[in-house]
Amino acid sequence: MPTADDIRWFKEQFSAEIETALTATPFDLDMIVAIACQETGYIWSILRKKHLPLDRVVALCVGDTIDYKGPHQGRQAFPRNKDALLAKPNGQAMFEIARKALEDMAAYIPGYQGAVANPKKFCRGFGVFQRDLQFFKDDPDYFLERRYESFANTLAHCLAELRRGLKKLGFESRTSLTDLEFAMVAIAYNTGGYNPSRGLQQGHFDGQKYYGELIVEYVTQSRSVAAAARLAPGRYVVIASGGLKLRGGPGTNFNSEKTLPAGSELNVVGIDNQDPSWVRVDLEGDGLLDGYVFAGFLAPAGIHPGEGVPEPD
């Protein structure tokens, strides 16, 4: 189970990109973090400590090696086993990709080494939010081209599935959701539907708790973890390699006034009271507020901008 430190790391890496993608949805950052924790948190919480590049951590977020074991036992969806996958067009190429993904991931995640020992085993879940290989029949290029290795792609498919969950529950017009309502949507994300009579006890069962129960726990835990450390007022430099957007308020829902190039220096004059991941900045040194920027893409003045990371559009 990801710890508070793991969740803090995840937010520091991906919160800006997630927040941007959540425009015009009823979801919030902590809800999406909860899905990531439940789907692959047991993987990225380990990988983040291996000193790997961030894109490599994302690429290694694969899983699900369970084969068909009979009616209502093991995997029921396509592909039930290696033979079922090989029977499809490009099945051999897909097996090789899925097998290699398993081997690469298992080099860091000991729990999968037993699966690697069986040459017929391969992964069915791909990306941080685990797009299932059953979609290979309809969208083979997504898997064959390994698009799941991009965080933007795996996030986009996560949100598309969550929107389908909204529709199934009649929540399409909602502008916000309670955490319990989101858990209902997440159950539909995991199982394809929601049975009101079972409440949160639906979805994958790990031997102790159901998917729905764990989602609520992860949302609660994520809400207790700040997205980024609070910055003290002072002089900072932009480390977003593609530049950092200056916004009219503390959030991606506010318009971008301009983009500050990497290496730009500015004064942080305060932290937003509601969301400490956003700070108020003064660009001219005249003591006047010029706007807000996301704190995760600032570093104390003197940090070389080449050490930065790209800010999402």
Image (cartoon, helix red, strand yellow):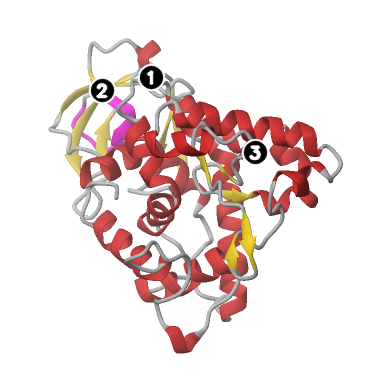
Q: Which circle marks residue 232 in the picture?
A: none
Q: Is residue 256 above or below residue 27?
A: above
Residue 52 is inside the magenta segment = no
Sequence-earlier tag: 1 or 3 = 3
Residue with the mark numbered 1:
308
Dividing the picture into quarters, in which one does residue 246 lie?
top left
For label 2, the crowd category at 10 Å Cα-Cα, with few meaning under 14, some 14 to 19 and many 20 or more, is: many
Comes first in the chain, label 2 or label 3:
3
The answer, for residue 255, to whether it is visible in the render is: no
Along the viewing direction, whichever of 168 and 25 lies nearer the viewer: 168
* Identity of the residue furthest to the bottom in this view: 197
**Is 89 displayed left or right of 287 in the figure?**
right
Left or right, 188 with reference to 134? left
Q: Disc 1, disc 2: CB below 8 Å?
A: yes
The answer to whether residue 237 shows anywhere in this view is yes
Name the amino acid type tagged 2: Ala
Which of labels 2 and 3 is toward the front?
Answer: 3
Quarter of the rendering containing residue 306: top left
Q: Residue at x 33, y 42 (%)?
A: 11
Q: Residue at x 34, y 20 (%)?
A: 51
Q: Secondary structure at mark 1?
A: loop
**What secondary structure is marked by label 3?**
loop
Q: Amino acid at mark 1?
A: Gly
Q: Which residue is mark 3?
A: 120
Q: Do callouts 2 and 3 mark residues in contact (Cβ within 8 Å)?
A: no
Helix, strand, or loop for circle 2? strand
Q: Which residues are magenta?
A: 286-298
Please tell me the numbered disc located at residue 299: 2
